[in-house]
Amino acid sequence: IRPHVPPGVFLCNARGAHDASTAEWVVAAMLGALRGFPGFAREQAAGRWSYQATDQLATKTVLIIGYGAIGAAVERRLAGFEVTVTRVARRARPGVSALAQLAALLPQADVVVLLVPFTPETAGMVDSGFLARLKDGALLVNAARGAVVDTEALITEVASGRLRAALDVTDPEPLPSGHALWSLPGVFITPHVAASTPVSRQRVAGLVGEQAAAYARAEPLRNVI
């Protein structure tokens, strides 16, 4: 967008508006996938009482890649779940590792949460090499953009039974009928709905109103790009 913004026009983003909703989706997807809720939903639809043990979130190491406002919101919601959180962002800062350190952190993670923006640096970042570094049984949670993940590489790993995935975004998107991701055991998919809630809409509207009022009063704007 930036090259098309004319002189004298402010470009701002909506940082903060979707934090709560997206963070809720991430934690819900994490819990649902680990506790086997998609499978139990299928058994319920078939009218079968299929008792089985499940995995759990407690004691897991959760690696958040793209530790910005939403990443921090995810961590706040994980408080009390008895997890260890590792944080990664584009640049290192206290308590947060840089993307350059990712290769060393991946083997320690039980759950990997993707929250990075889609940029030339992150396009296809989750490739076969990235996935190969994850431990057996690890869960990939993508609430970023579908093209951050190499879909074919993910299909290969999940089809082998080695990894699991919870996806709110896919590549391609919308995911066409008959695509391999739909039917793979160990994959839970929602249709890009993480921020599709009343609270997100209310906060976006509120932010737009605040920005317009600030502009009219010649006051500083929030989230200026």
Image (cartoon, rainbow, N blue to C red):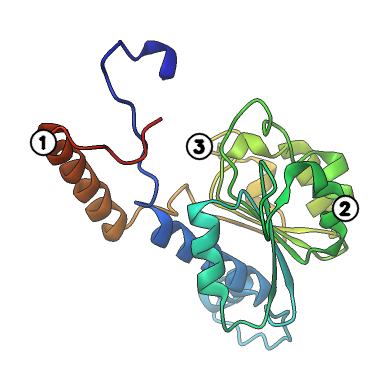
Task: Looking at the picture, tell me which residue is in the foreground, 182 or 206.
Answer: 206
The C terminus sits in image quarter: top left
SS of the residue at dot 3? loop
Q: Residue at x 68, y 56 (%)?
A: 96
Residue matched to label 1: 217
Query: From this viewpoint, is residue 93 visible?
Result: yes
SS of the residue at dot 2? helix
Residue matched to label 2: 104
Q: CA distance from mark 1 to mark 3?
A: 42 Å
Q: Pick whichever of labels 2 and 3 is earlier in the sequence.
A: 2
Place of residue 207 in the rendered image (x, y in percent of width and height, measured from the top left): 24, 46
Based on the displayed image, in which of its 4 quarters is residue 127 positioned?
A: top right
Residue matched to label 3: 174
Q: Residue at x 74, y 75 (%)?
A: 60
Query: What's the mark number on residue 41?
Result: none
Place of residue 192 in the rendered image (x, y in percent of width and height, measured from the top left): 47, 47
